[in-house]
Image: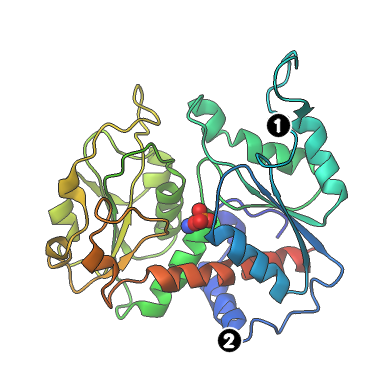
Amino acid sequence: MRNFTNVSDIGDLKAAVAEAMQVKADRFAFSELGRNRTLLMIFFNSSLRTRLSTQKAAMNLGMNTIVLDVNQGAWKLETERGVIMDGDKPEHLLEAVPVMGCYCDVIGVRSFARFENKADDYGEKILNQFIEHSGRPVFSMEAATRHPLQSFADLITIEEYKTKERPKVVMTWAPHPKSLPQAVPNSFAEWMNATDYDFVIANPEGYDLSPEFVGKARVTHNQDEALAGADFVYAKNWSAFEDPNYGKVISTDRSWTVTAEKMALTDNAYFMHCLPVRRNMIVSDDVIESPRSLVIPEAANREISAQVVLKRILESL
Ligand code: CP
């Protein structure tokens, strides 16, 4: 595998999950693979889980790691061509990216949607500049439209906990005070659509995701109807995708918060969220603290998904 930006890069999902289980059973079995190899992790945005889990995964494989927070200590980067650089950004991404490539063997990039230009966001302008100009394999640590390491960890978690061959998985929008990208829900939908699960998306009107990510999923604007009989409830907030509201908060309807009453509609479902989560906006305290909450196992599986991806990239060098 050269680059990892979406579900198609991982290939057969059953094989990927089997490899994840092998890594999980002995995460130091491939500790020679990354010897004398360096991972550079570039963060344009904040992170707790991605930063720690990916660094740990690289260390399990014997890699050296360098972490750069672009907005803390590095030169501010211009990303547009043709700009007269007389402002506060002294370096251009088009020089910075190949320079970064000189110091590493593999690059991970976190760069969220900016909500300035939908075409730029959905064209993955920043991530693609790394792929084009770094000269190194690149993987997404959450980009503008997808968060594939998270979705892979979510899939591993569902496979570990499912008790039915074809579980009902419901991804539900939940309220949040700020504009959040669509990357996590887009990506989760993309990965669920690549399985044979019964996959349903519930969101208020005006919050439909891009059709390219909704794919074959059933979409409803009635959360209670979606939750009926669910085996897994995956809660997430996202801002509006559709124009003219792209990137905007158009509702904070607290009746969409996942509460114990909502979970009672399900078939004793597990609760999932990628974290960080705003309690009593997205999910009530009792639900996230319940024995059916998988938020910590999901986060733990971030190390495993990152390790499978890094292992495959290293094997291709
Ligand atoms: N879920 C996730 O990606 O968490 P961080 O933003 O903390 O990395």
Residue drawn at the location 42% of the way across and 71% of the way down: 296
Disc 1/disc 2 C-alpha distance (Å) = 42 Å
Which of the 4 image quadrants contains residue 9? Answer: bottom right
Amino acid type of the residue tagged 1 in the rendering? Lys
In the picture, which quadrant includes the N terminus? bottom right
Residue 7: in sight, yes or no? no
Which of the 4 image quadrants contains residue 267? Answer: bottom left
* Element type at mark 2: helix
Using the image as rendered, state which of residue 123 and residue 61 is in the foreground: 61
174 in relation to 118, above or below? below
Residue designated by label 2: 25
81 in relation to 115, above or below? above
70 in relation to 88, above or below? below
Which of the 4 image quadrants contains residue 195? Answer: bottom left
* Whole-percent x, y for residue 40 in the image: 75, 54
* Whole-percent x, y for residue 142 in the image: 55, 49
Mark count:
2
* Element type at mark 1: loop
Q: Residues within 10 Å of mark 2 (few under 14, many from 20)?
A: few
User: Is label 2's Cβ within 8 Å of ligand 1?
Assistant: no
Which of disc 2 and disc 1 is earlier in sequence? 2
Q: Is residue 135 left or right of residue 138?
A: right
Residue drawn at the location 41% of the way across and 41% of the way down: 180
Residue 45: in sight, yes or no? yes
Residue drawn at the location 85% of the way across and 41% of the way down: 99
Amino acid type of the residue tagged 2 in the rendering? Ala
In the picture, the disc for residue 76 is: 1
* Whole-percent x, y for residue 202 in the image: 24, 49
Q: Residues within 10 Å of mark 1 (few under 14, many from 20)?
A: some
* Whole-percent x, y for residue 133 in the image: 79, 38
